[in-house]
Each structure stands twice: as structure tokens, then as C-alpha cells.
Image (spheres, rainbow, N blue to C red):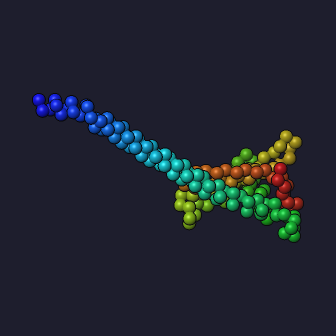
Amino acid sequence: MELKTSLKEIKRSDRGASLVLIAAFSTIVIAMAVTLTIVSSMIFSNAENRSRQDQAYELGTGLFSRIEELILNEPASGTNKACIDLESYFADSVPSDKKGIIMEESDFESLPDSKVTVSVAKNTDRVGKTFYTLTVKAEAIGETYIRTEDYTGNVLAGYERM
């Protein structure tokens, strides 16, 4: 009997509505906390991926610009001759469709599990003119950056970008 009276008193008072309101508010707060945790972990994951991409990009572009500088050897340095002879990477025994490796380095101090490969391929255009395709492939922490550029010319006269 006493229980029935106490339930009737709760129904008549606003204590029952308050309990429901508090339960609903607590559910909303918990859902917001879980949502914020998930969103923040996604943001940090994207930032980490972007950092890896940037490291591969910096490694590849830095090396590419230095090698291109040696290939082009701009007239401001006093000569038009190239510092790198692209033809020298192709021996008579190597088929012309194969790539010559200029440089291959791995495991840089600040970037473990990184690797850079610089290669050159000898090609012929429709007219029969020889050109060289320089490819720099940089791999850093699971990300890869590849850049290619075509050059014509020779070591004596100098090379030009196509």
C-alpha cells in the first residue's frame, strides 16, 4: 500500500518529469562527447597523412630541382654544357627502352624507411629525335611522390627542357 501511495505522489509531483529530463540531457551529453572524440581522431589521422605526403613531396622536389640544375646548367654559371651526361647511363648492351639509374638512396637520417630513385629513360619522338625522360620517385613513410620531365640535347651543347 505504501508503494502505491509513493508512486502516486511521484506522478503528482514534477519529480518524475525531472528524472526523465535529466536522463535525456545525460544521453545528449554522452553522445556529444563520443562524437567529438571520433571527429578529433579523424582530424588527427588526416593531419598525419598530410604530413607523410609533405615529407615525400619535399624529398622528391628537392632532389629533382638539384638534378635538373645539374642537367640544364644554366648559362649564368659560365657555361652551357651539362654537368650530367644523360647518354652515359645507356651502354650499348642496354636496350633503349630500359631506364638508366642515376641515383638510388634509402634511409635518410630524419626519414626512416625512405627511398629516392632517380632514373632516366631514352626515347625517340615521331621525327626520330632522341629525348630523355628524367623520373624522380620519392617514398617516405608509406607515401610516394613521382615527378617526370623530358629533356633534349646532349652533354656538349647542353640540355633543354621540352
Q: Is residue 108 above or below residue 91?
A: below
Q: Is residue 90 above or below residue 74?
A: above
Number of marks in the image? 0
Picture coordinates of residue 13, whole percent (x, y)? 27, 35
Q: Residue at x 51, y 51 (%)?
A: 44
- Say which quadrant the N terminus sits in: top left
In this rendering, does residue 146 appear at all?
Answer: yes
Q: 95 or 107: nearer the eye?
A: 107
Q: Residue at x 49, y 49 (%)?
A: 40
Picture coordinates of residue 6, whole percent (x, y)? 18, 34
Q: 37 or 11: nearer the eye?
A: 11
Q: Residue furthest left?
A: 1
Task: Give residue 117's quadrant in the image.
Answer: bottom right
Q: Is residue 119 above or below residue 127?
A: below
Picture coordinates of residue 91, whole percent (x, y)? 74, 55
Q: Residue at x 69, y 60 (%)?
A: 62
Q: Residue at x 79, y 65 (%)?
A: 83
Q: 35 or 46: nearer the eye?
A: 35
In this rendering, does residue 94 appear at all?
Answer: no
Q: Residue furthest bottom?
A: 78
Instruction: Specify whether 129 is left or right of 137.
Output: right
Instruction: Specify whether 52 is left or right of 91.
Output: left
Instruction: Specify whether 60 is left or right of 130.
Output: left
